[in-house]
Amino acid sequence: MIRSTLATIRKTSGAGDARRGAVIVMAAALMILILAFVAFSVDVGYIAMTKAQLQNAVDAAALAGAQELNPYEPQGKVAARVRQAASDVAERHRAGNEPRVSVAGHAGKVELGRRTYDPDRGQFRYEWGAEPFNIVRVTASRTAGRRKGQAVADNRLPLLFAPVIGHDKASIEVSAVATFQPRDIMLVLDYSASMNDDSELAAIDSLGRSAVIGNIRQMWEDLGSPVYGKLDFEPQWVTVPGQPASGAIPHIDVTWQWTSIDVASTKDLSNVVLEFDNGRREKFDGLKKPRGTFSGTGSNRGRPIVRCWIKSGSNDSGAGPGYGEGFDFFDNANIRRGLGLDAVPYPYPSGRWDDYIEYARSHRWGQPWYDSDVEAAGYRAKFGLLTLINFWNKNKPMHRETPDLWKASQQPITALKDATDLFLDYLVAVNAEDQVGLSVYTFPQSDGAKLESPLVHDYKLIKKISRERQAGHYDHYTNIGAGMRTARQELETNSRRGAVRMMVLMTDGIANRSSTGASPRQFALDEAELARRAGIKITTTSLGVTADTALMQEIADITQGTHFNVPGGRSVNQYERELKRVFGEIAADRPLKLIRDVE
C-alpha cells in the first residue's frame, strides 16, 4: 500500500513538472508577441505623432506663404517671398527626431498656382504654376528614393522597436494648401453733395488756386468742352450791346466791370450818367470822344454800378436832360444778350441762364444765388464756364438737376471711384470668390439709402454703377446709418454660408440725417451694434477735414474692424494716392483658409 502510494505521488509530480514547463514556454512566446505588439503600438504612435507634427508645420507654412501673395508685384519676387515665408515658419516646428521641419530640397517643396471656379463643372480648377498666384501648396517629405532621376538622402523616420521585425524606418509625406477665404463685402459709400467740395472755388484756400482751377478745367474737358454763347472758360466781363446804328443814332457797346464801365460808340460821346447800388447818380459832361472808361468819384468811388445812360449822337432815353441810351446791368435780359445766350437753351433739366447770371453777379448777401466764394476768387460779375461749373457743383449737383456731372472729375468723389476700381481690380486679380455689393447714401425716400447692387461676382457692374454716380446724386445730405442699414440687411439676407461678412464704410462728412427717431450719429452707432451681432466686421474710412473721425473710429471699434483716416488739406493727387493705398490694404487684408479637396 505504501509503495503504491509513493508510486502514485512520483507519477503525479512528473506530470506537474511537464505542465509547468509548457506554461513557461507559452509565457515566453506570449511575452515576445506582447512585446511585438507594444513595439508596434509605440512605433505606430510615433509615426502618427510625427505625421501630426509635420501636418501642423505645413499648415502653418502654407498660411504664412499665402500671406505673401500679391497679384500686383512681379510674380517671380512674390514666389521667392512665399517660399521664404513658408520655409521660415516650417523650421519653427519639430517632427519626430528632427528639431526643425524643412520644406526645401529633398525634404519638401513649396508650389504656387492659381485656383479658379468653373461654373460649367460646378467645381474649382487648380493650375500649378499659373500666374498671378492665388494658392500655395506646401509639402513635407520623410522619404527615401529618387526624385527627377536623382538619388536623394534617406529622410525616413527612424523607428524604435520595429527594427526587431525588419522595419527600421517609416516613410511619411504630408501637404497643405492655403488660399483666401471668400468674403461677402458691402461697399457703403458717401455720395453726398460734399463729395465735390474740392472741385469748388471754396477749396482755393486749402488746395491752392491753380489746383482748383485746373480741376474745374478738367471737368469742363471731361464734359466735352461745351461752348455756350460767348462764354469762355475763364470768366470775363460782359459787353452789353446797344441798339443798332441808324442815321444820327449810334451803336454803343458797354463793358460792365462792376465798379466801372468801358464805353465804345460809333459817334462821339456827350454825357455819361452812372447809377450806383446805393441809388445815387453821377454825371460826366462835356465828352468829345467815342470811347471812355467811367467809374464813381468822391463818395461814389469803388461803388458797384447798377445801370448807366450814354448820350451819343441824337439818342435820347427821356430819363432826363442829357440822358441817352440806358443800360441796366441787373436786367438779366441785357446780360443774356451780351453773353450771346438768348438763343441758347439752358443745357440741363434744372435751372435757367438767369439763375447762373444772378449767381455769377453775386451782388450782396441775401440776394438770390449769392456766393461769397465767387467774390473771393475774383470772379464777381464775370461770366464763364469756370463759374458755370462751380454753380452746378454747388447748387445743382443732383443727377436730376445736372445729369452729366458723373462724367466729370469731381473731387474727391473721383478719387473714391478710382480707389473703388483699384479695390475691385485686386479682387479680380486674386480671384478669391469674393462677392461685392454697393449701398449708396443718402437717398431722399424714407429708406435714406439705395441698394445700388446686391452681392454679386460681377465686379464690372459695381464699377459701372459707382462711376455713373455723382456727388449729391440723389440727395445733398449724409445719412450714414441708412447706408449701413441697407448693407447689413443685404448681408444678413444674401451672404453665403462660410463667407466672411464685411462692410467697407466711407464718408467725408458728418452724419446729418436719420431714418429713425435717433439722432443721425446715434443711428449710425445703433447700426454698428446690429452689425456686430450679425457677425459683420466694418472697416471705416474718413476722408478730409470735415469727416467725423471719432464716429468712424467708434463704429470700427464696435465691430472689431479697422479705421483709416485720410486727413484733409491735401492735393487731389495726394487724396487719390492715399485712398488707393487704404482701399488696397482693405482688399489685401484677407482671411486665409486651408483647403483639403485639391485635385
Image (cartoon, helix red, strand yellow):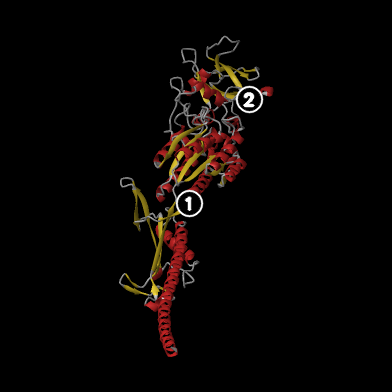
* Viewer-nearest residue: 586 or 174: 174
Residue at mark 2: 365
Q: Which residue is found at the position 44% from the left and 65% from the top?
A: 54
- Is residue 140 depicted above or below 499 in this figure? below
Which numbered disc, 1 or 2, marks the residue closer to the eye?
A: 1
**Image coords of residue 244 (percent x, y):** 46, 15
**Image coords of residue 71 (percent x, y):** 42, 53
Outermost residue, front side: 1
Seen in the image, is 595 located left or right of residue 386?
A: left
- Is residue 534 depicted above or below 128 in this figure? above
Under mark 2, the amino acid is Trp
Mark 2 residue crowding within 10 angstroms, few (<14) / some (14–19) / many (20+):
few
Instruction: Name the quarter where the C terminus is drawn.
Output: bottom left
Can residue 438 be seen here? yes
Looking at marks 1 and 2 on the same chain, the residue that comes earlier in the sequence is marked by 2
Under mark 1, the amino acid is Pro
Residue at mark 1: 591
